Image: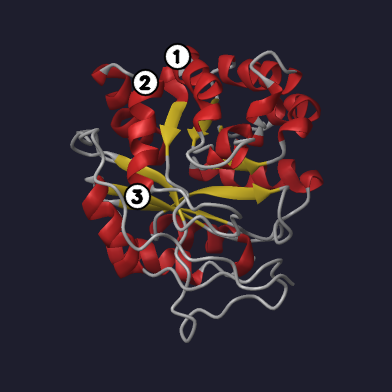
Amino acid sequence: MSETCQAPRTTIKTPDLKAPPGACDCHIHITGPFERFPLSEHRAYTPPEATLPQYEHVQDVLGTQRVVIVQPSFYTTDNGCTLDAVAHFGVQRSRAVVVVDPQIGDAQLRQMHEAGARGVRVNLVTPGGPPVDHLMQLAEKIAPFGWHTQIYANGEDLPDLLPILRRLPTDVVIDHMGQIPAAWGITHPAITALRALLDGGRTWLKLCGYRCSSVGYPFRDLDALATLLARVATERCVWGTDWPHPNFEGTMPDDGELLDALKQWAPSTQAQQRILVDNPAALYGFDPQ
């Protein structure tokens, strides 16, 4: 197990991009407090606490109103902290993406649905999630609830995953811009596979890609890929900070700068409205603005 990773920034830039009403940060994690929500003994790394009041400050600076809390690997299948965060914000303003055992029953899924869960995350990068061969089993269980399958995979695996993901009976959400290193350029087979998924009409992409940077902060080498994806799949992209940026080495992202990057990737107010408001409302079932 690694040592405790660094905490997020205590101050962030006020973004130049004014978030439209109903804007959603579609990817954050809440950690702790540890006396209520202790970390799993089987975690791959040890994060510091990143609590609801800390994120509410981020939300105030960004001007976002909605949020999606994603179950992190260090809580494995104990979704208590994630669902508690949804209860705090309320289901009018928040949703959860959970991690579950493939043997989970319908009654438990129904309880999670009522608590605000709308997707299951399958993490193929960090230990703590189900293996890829459980994808179909999981998708078949959650499909009746209208949930999606969120995939966190390395870019090099996307071509092999393409036929599997196409067969799933749910919508698919690709985490962290496909985890495709920016240094690969925009003609790499991983990007071809990602675009093929997006063209299929049942796949969504999280424009939350600083982890794909090959040079580090301020992550400008992502601009070519992110601009391409935001242009060719405007109706299928959502945006997120990945706050509190767990297990990240190097200079920590500034969440205000991450929102301003979207202004470069999707310059028109119409595209920003789709990515920040309309697409999250459709994907996560929020009331339209």
Q: Can residue 273 be seen here? A: yes
Relative to 284, residue 223 above or below: above
- Callout 1 crowding tier (Cα within 10 Å): few <14, some 14–19, many ≥20: some
Q: Quadrant of the C terminus?
A: top left
Report how far apart the C-alphas of labels 3 and 2 lie in the structure: 20 Å
Residue lying furthest bottom in this view?
Answer: 35
| 258 horizontally vs 169: left or right | left
How far across and down, in percent of the image, does residue 140 sit? 66, 42
The amino acid beneath tag 1 is: Arg
* In front: label 3 or label 2: 2
- Callout 2 crowding tier (Cα within 10 Å): few <14, some 14–19, many ≥20: many
The amino acid beneath tag 2 is: Ala
Q: Are marks 1 and 2 in contact (CB under 8 Å)?
A: yes
Q: Secondary structure at mark 1?
A: helix
| 18 horizontally vs 259: left or right | left
Numbered badge on residue 67: 3
